[in-house]
């Protein structure tokens, strides 16, 4: 395993009455694309500003490349922060913007030219060095902001909602682009975002924060497929949930009965570690893991539940169904539109949901 690049040890930070960051411990590896994901106000920016040196922790310690950075000012840290608003100088060309910091530090002219060229190559802006920011697209401005940070050759690049100012389509393109740039330059990227798809797409690992606390850290796949809390399950994409009690345990499998299910129905799921009969449990299931059918047969699946279609929303690549399982319980199901005689379910019609026990996650108290 690569040696750690950045380490936070029990870091806390208070803003007035708010505990913005609460005993946060994280280890970020060298060369890793690491994202901190959480809703607005969860302490992401505060964490990044402490790494950059613009704020200091009230408690705990931060190590970069194995050394504590306590008391080290921002310009002496091997990190660079890229802001959401790119803060480019409008009257300077692309090259002028990228060179600015080096000129301020009186780096020799010949070195500056070479390093600006290198940074332009990294973000694939060759040939655009003489343009003004206003003559660039949003995505290109974003890349200038990146180049301006990369030209300083930091060990760690810090990005605060780097794609926040871009529209939906450009954002999707830039997610892939940012990841590609990061792989090309091989630096540690620490990216803060409230956008779950962005974090999953770009990152090697993701840390999910809520109210200053770390809830879970893992690969995008871990976070999506094995959320450890209802908050993470709900925040990372849509998930259906069902709160009930474990009724029977049979080896690695258990049955969960819930008041919200139609009478006579229960759910078979993987048994959560340490849970016994009678324990409270929440079953969490992703909308794309459920198969819809007009017939009640299990057909090789472990679970079947009846429902009625409330809504069927066609959105091009898939159809999103809202299904009423009972008066109180509504789930979403997403079915890819593959064409060719695919069965469609109209609002008002009965339907059966089927899925494999292992597709669901069971959270127990
Ligand atoms: P995020 O970036 O996840 O949205 P922040 O780190 O900006 O979260 O903020 C975390 C919490 O700290 C929020 O409740 C926010 O209102 C509060 N906070 C952040 N900066 C300040 C500040 N300078 N003064 C007072 N409260 C602040
Ligand atoms: Mg923020």
Image: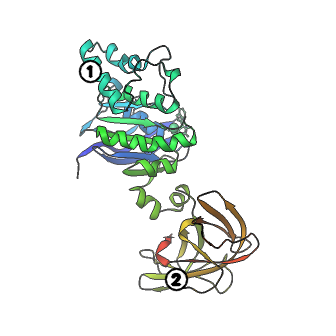
Numbered tag placed on residue 114 in the rendering: 1
Q: Secondary structure at mark 2?
A: loop
Residue at x-position 31% and y-position 23%: 117
Q: Nearer the viewer, mark 1 or mark 2?
A: 1
- The residue carrying mark 1 has its beta carbon less than 8 Å from ligand 2: no
Numbered tag placed on residue 138 in the rendering: none
Up-down: is 274 above or below 143?
Answer: below
**Residue 227 visible somewhere in the drawing:** no
Residue at x-position 23% and y-position 49%: 2
Between 242 and 296, the one lying in front of the other is: 296
Q: Position of residue 341 (x, y in %)?
A: 62, 73
Between 321 and 13, the one lying in front of the other is: 321
Up-down: is 170 above or below 357?
Answer: above
- Crowding around mark 2 (Cα neighbors within 10 Å: few <14, some 14 to 19, many 20+) is some
Is 117 positioned to the left or the right of 41 in the image? left
Q: Which residue is mark 2?
A: 302
Q: Position of residue 148 (x, y in %)?
A: 38, 25
- Crowding around mark 1 (Cα neighbors within 10 Å: few <14, some 14 to 19, many 20+) is few
């Amino acid at each position: 395993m690569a040696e750690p690049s950045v380490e936070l040890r029990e870091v806390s930070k208070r803003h007035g009455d708010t505990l913005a960051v609460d005993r946060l411990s994280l280890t970020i590896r060298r060369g890793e694309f690491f994202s901190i994901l959480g809703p607005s106000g969860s302490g992401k920016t505060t964490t990044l500003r402490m790494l950059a040196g613009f704020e200091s922790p009230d408690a705990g310690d931060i190590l970069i490349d194995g050394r504590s950075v306590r008391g080290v000012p921002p310009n002496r840290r091997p990190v660079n922060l890229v802001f959401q608003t790119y803060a480019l100088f409008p009257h300077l060309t692309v090259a002028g913007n990228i060179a600015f910091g080096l000129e301020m530090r009186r780096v020799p002219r010949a070195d500056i030219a070479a390093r600006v060229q290198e940074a332009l190559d990294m973000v694939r802006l060759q040939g655009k060095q003489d343009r003004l920011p206003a003559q660039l697209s949003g995505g290109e401005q974003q890349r200038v902001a990146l180049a301006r940070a990369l030209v300083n050759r930091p060990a760690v690049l810090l990005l605060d909602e780097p794609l926040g100012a871009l529209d939906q389509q450009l954002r999707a393109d830039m997610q892939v682009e940012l990841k590609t740039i990061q792989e090309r330059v091989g630096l540690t990227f620490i990216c803060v975002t409230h956008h779950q798809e962005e974090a999953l797409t770009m990152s090697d690992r993701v840390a999910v924060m809520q109210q200053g606390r770390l809830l879970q850290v893992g690969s995008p796949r871990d976070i999506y497929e094995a959320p450890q809390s209802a908050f993470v399950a709900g925040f990372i994409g849509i998930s259906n949930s069902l709160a009930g009690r474990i009724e029977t345990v049979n080896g690695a499998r258990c049955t969960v009965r819930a008041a919200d299910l139609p009478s006579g129905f229960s759910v078979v799921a993987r048994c959560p570690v340490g849970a016994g009969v009678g324990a409270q449990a929440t079953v969490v299931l992703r909308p794309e893991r459920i198969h819809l059918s007009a017939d009640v047969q299990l057909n090789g699946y472990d679970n079947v539940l009846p429902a009625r279609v409330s809504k069927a929303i066609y959105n091009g690549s898939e159809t999103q169904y809202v299904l009423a399982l009972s008066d109180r319980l509504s789930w979403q199901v997403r079915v890819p539109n593959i064409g060719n005689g695919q069965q469609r379910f109209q609002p008002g019609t009965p339907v059966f949901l089927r899925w494999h026990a292992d597709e669901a996650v069971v959270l127990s108290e």
